[in-house]
């Protein structure tokens, strides 16, 4: 039994205890010492649930407001309207309704976002108390909640998501991109499926399907960014895909709208680079797109040894420009961000050699530096497959899937010795999608990782109390090759979208909060 579970059981026993006179003096002294210990001021941020009859007692407004306006000390998970009955209410239910309205007025005054109404059921009198003992049932419950709040035990309040299937039959589903396709201010979804001859997008709201490009040969990856300022993104698309370099022309296309973005767009070929596999938008002295092929043009299975190029394109000529050919073997992961805080985009890659950082000097010279070696197993089971960056506990972290299409979800934290590797989950197979984002709004990014192989799961890892806790977002219904994190319904919370390969589907998971 965990320390938390033991403490909870102890509190329940104390709260349910009989008359002190029936207890030995030693037991009473021990109980009092335990209570005093539990009522000591907390040493860290408290997660609290508030039960209030603020329509009945004026001091409750101040207490609730204090909690909500003290995010450094307290995280208010919920505010419950308590039932009461006296001269100010006709019944317990009427009292709860009046408390609910008072809570809403306070939240509006504090300029807090939406409140969700809970159950209106009021427990009637019963001959059987909820807890046995000398304390009335209601007092026992309040006392127990108070102790749990003060001690700040881990809570089971999980995020709730509403699942919605947008499409099926997406053969070889491989990438989902969240972007405003038609310039209406809403985030749409582009669904790329390698086994289909058309590239499609789904318009928000309503999620109507539109064909963006057809025909298209074995599309594998794209990036979208508005580079001409018209409010509609330009797209760079990699197609002609095969894991065999000799069978992969790696055609790279510039895709632009012709007029109405709901009608098919036009594509212009800008390059051919075998096994072109990952495309990301970047700012490299202006708008640019980075292309990371999977392997070298002469690489052979199973070792795939060879120098794998990393290149980029930019307007107006869209010529291929070399970043580096230092990476060796399979390069599966690619991220673009300002890693060192100098205001310029940097590049992270995940490969058989681990995680590397590419930075560009003001003079235009690229430098490669290893951040982590990844899985220490011998080549070709070494290194990293995917990489993402987040923040938790006030510090930056790296999330990785290791090794290539591997079974480990890994977190890297930096200390004086460098980036320290911690495997937080090694119970999976064929992990593929990896994303980070603050889904619950607590200041800590969650990690979303997907098990593409059977039994097909989308997993969510939350940073709680200094450790990563695993939760399941989808169990069996999504063999995600890729996921995206974005606010899809405009409620201020980040949602999740995933596209499945074996399941050939596109789903969204709308964040309902806690």
Image: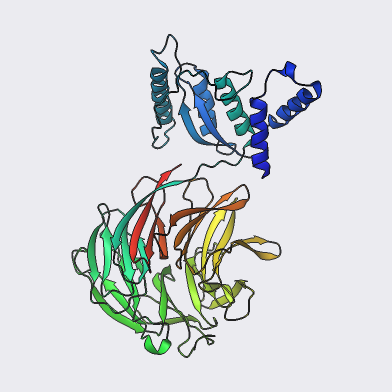
Position of the N terminus by quadrant: top right
Q: Position of residue 431 (x, y in %)?
A: 49, 67
Residue 211 higher or lower than 137, as above or below: below
Q: Is residue 226 visible?
A: no
Q: Please identify the residue farthest to the front as the structure is shown.
A: 127
Between 461 and 262, the one nearer to me in the picture: 461
Which residue is found at the position 54% from the left and 29% from the top? 66
Q: Position of residue 374 (x, y in %)?
A: 60, 71
* Count of number-bearing discs: 0
Q: Is residue 13 visible?
A: yes
What sort of colour scheme is used for the picture? rainbow
Q: Position of residue 434 (x, y in %)?
A: 48, 63
Which residue is found at the position 27% from the left and 63% from the top? 201
Left or right: residue 298 versus residue 488 is right
Between 276 and 283, the one nearer to me in the picture: 276
Which residue is found at the position 29% from the left and 81% from the top? 269
Between 370 and 242, the one nearer to me in the picture: 242
Q: Please identify the residue farthest to the right as the structure is shown.
A: 26
Left or right: residue 446 versus residue 493 is right
When asked about the image quadrant of residue 188, the answer is bottom left
Q: Position of residue 514 (x, y in %)?
A: 46, 41
Residue 310 higher or lower than 187, as above or below: below
Q: Please identify the residue farthest to the top as the structure is shown.
A: 87
Residue 157 higher or lower than 145, as above or below: below
Which residue is found at the position 53% from the left and 78% from the top? 365
């Amino acid at each position: 039994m965990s320390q938390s579970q033991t403490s909870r059981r102890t509190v329940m026993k104390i709260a349910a205890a009989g008359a002190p006179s029936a207890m030995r003096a030693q037991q009473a002294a021990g109980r009092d010492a335990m209570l005093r210990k539990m009522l000591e001021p907390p040493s860290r941020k408290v997660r609290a649930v508030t039960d209030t009859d603020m329509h009945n007692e004026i001091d409750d407004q101040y207490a609730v407001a204090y909690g909500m306006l003290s995010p450094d000390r307290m995280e208010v998970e919920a505010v419950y309207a308590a039932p009461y009955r006296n001269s100010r209410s006709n019944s317990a239910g009427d009292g709860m309704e009046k408390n609910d309205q008072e809570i809403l007025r306070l939240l509006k005054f504090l300029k807090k976002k939406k409140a969700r109404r809970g159950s209106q059921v009021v427990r009637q009198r019963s001959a059987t108390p909820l807890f046995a003992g000398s304390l009335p049932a209601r007092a026992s419950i309040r006392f127990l909640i108070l102790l749990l709040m003060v001690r700040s035990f881990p809570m089971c309040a999980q995020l709730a998501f509403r699942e919605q299937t947008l499409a099926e039959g997406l053969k070889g589903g491989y990438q989902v991109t969240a972007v405003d396709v038609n310039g209406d201010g809403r985030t749409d979804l582009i669904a790329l499926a390698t086994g289909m001859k058309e590239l499609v997008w789904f318009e928000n709201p309503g999620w109507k399907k539109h064909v963006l490009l057809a025909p298209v040969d074995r599309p594998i990856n794209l990036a979208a960014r508005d580079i001409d300022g018209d409010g509609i993104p330009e797209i760079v698309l990699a197609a002609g895909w095969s894991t065999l370099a000799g069978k992969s022309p790696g055609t790279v296309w510039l895709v632009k709208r012709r007029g109405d973005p709901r009608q098919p767009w036009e594509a212009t070929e800008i390059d051919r680079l075998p096994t072109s596999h990952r495309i990301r938008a970047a700012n490299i002295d202006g708008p640019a797109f980075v292309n990371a092929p999977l392997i070298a043009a002469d690489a052979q299975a199973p070792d795939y040894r060879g120098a794998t190029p990393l290149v980029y394109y930019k307007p107006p000529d869209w010529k291929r420009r070399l970043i580096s050919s230092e990476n060796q073997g399979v390069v599966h992961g690619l991220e673009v961000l300002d890693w060192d805080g100098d205001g310029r985009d940097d590049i992270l890659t995940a490969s058989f050699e681990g995680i590397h950082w590419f930075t560009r000097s003001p003079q235009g010279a690229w430098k490669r530096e290893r951040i982590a070696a990844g899985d220490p197993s011998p080549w070709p089971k070494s290194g990293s497959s995917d990489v993402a960056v987040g923040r938790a506990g006030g510090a930056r972290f790296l999330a990785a899937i290791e090794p290539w299409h591997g079974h480990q979800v890994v977190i890297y934290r930096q200390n004086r010795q460098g980036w320290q590797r911690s495997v937080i989950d090694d119970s999976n197979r064929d992990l593929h999608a990896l994303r980070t984002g603050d889904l619950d709004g607590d200041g800590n990014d969650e990690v979303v990782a997907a098990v593409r192989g059977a039994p097909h799961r989308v997993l969510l890892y939350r940073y709680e109390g200094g450790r990563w806790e695993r939760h399941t977002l989808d169990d069996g219904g999504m063999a995600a090759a890729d996921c995206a994190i974005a606010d899809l319904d405009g409620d201020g919370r980040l949602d999740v979208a995933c596209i499945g390969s074996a399941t050939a589907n596109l789903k969204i998971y709308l964040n309902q909060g806690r």
